[in-house]
Image (cartoon, rainbow, N blue to C red):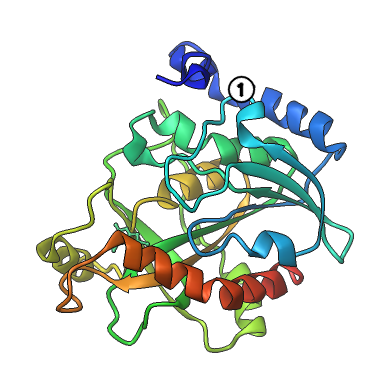
Amino acid sequence: MASEDLANPFDDPAADPFEIARIAAEQIAERTGVEHHDIALTLGSGWGKAADLIGETTACVPATDIVGFSRPSVVGHVGTIRSVLLPSGKRALVIGARTHFYEGHGVRRVVHSVRTAAATGAKIMVLTNGAGGLKPEWAPGTPVLISDHINLTASSPLEGATFVDLTDLYARRLRDIARQVDASLDEGVYVQFRGPHYETPAEVGMAGRIGGDIVGMSTALEAIAARHAGMEVLGMSLITNPAAGISPVPLDHAEVLAAGVAAEPVISDLLARIVEKL
Ligand code: 8IG
């Protein structure tokens, strides 16, 4: 076990996750010199280059220097937290370190970055990911807006009698802004599976029949935590592969990563132009 895992405050079940997020936000303010952030972005596979395009990075902190964050387990994910000055003068917090539910550290750690972003003052949470697509017309490399989600993790970031409304969770207002930048952006319902295995073709068939269009292993739990924290959510998936059974060819993680790398400049530029309008 790595030493940062031993030291992780979430290992204490009695710890208050919101207090840990508040301390993390204080550390971010200290390390970046930016007291208040307006927008936060979590950049998933394929979206990393957006960090360089949205504005001027004024500070870059290893995520492991901030309380509660852990080193990302997925190759291709960058473990840094950046403060970026946007052309509008707003400040963006760019989180390049996502903890996935399938890592087994518990849902509190999965949503810690979102709660920390809220504690820095961010009112908009942009959640991006790489995902599988159910619509055959979505070629690998297609970015799509998330219109809603189906949470198949059997978990929630909320504890106790916390009844939070999730209507318009992926704000129509923000999706409309995204389509002002690119009118051709399609949208779909994101289905979060636990992973880390990809779905069977039967599971993808089920996802489609219950109303899903996109399959992935992140985002839904984070979006719930963002709504609970009072943030507006914009969700975008990069379709890196047809979901299992949609194409006759089996999924290969290297191919999935390669599709992300190939699409990265295009979708990162798209995201930067959207962020400019938020
Ligand atoms: I990239 O096809 C990527 N992430 N669950 N299914 C799930 N997650 C994914 C997929 C996929 N592709």
**Rendered image quadrant of residue 116:** top right
Q: Nearer the viewer, residue 169 or 70?
A: 70
Q: Is residue 20 visible?
A: yes
Q: Residues within 10 Å of mark 1 (few under 14, many from 20)?
A: some
Residue 76 in percent (x, y) is at 48, 53
Would you say 240 lies left or right of 273 here?
A: left
**In-front residue for pair 47/182:** 47
Does the Cβ of the disc 1 residue fall within 8 Å of ligand 1?
no
Residue at horizontal 48%, vertical 46%?
Answer: 222
Is residue 166 shown above or below 3?
Answer: below
- Where in the image, quadrant-wise, is ligand 1 located? bottom left
Q: Quadrant of residue 112?
A: top right
Instruction: Describe residue 20's horizontal placement relative to residue 150 as left or right.
Output: right
The quarter of the rendered structure image containing the N terminus is: top left
Which residue is under mark 1?
20
Task: Please provide percent x and percent y for residue 193.
Answer: 28, 51
Q: Quadrant of the C terminus?
A: bottom right
Q: Position of residue 273 (x, y in %)?
A: 71, 75
Residue positioned 61% across, 85% down in the render:
182
Residue at 13% in and 66% down: 201
For residue 156, which quarter of the picture?
Answer: top left
Number of callouts in the render? 1
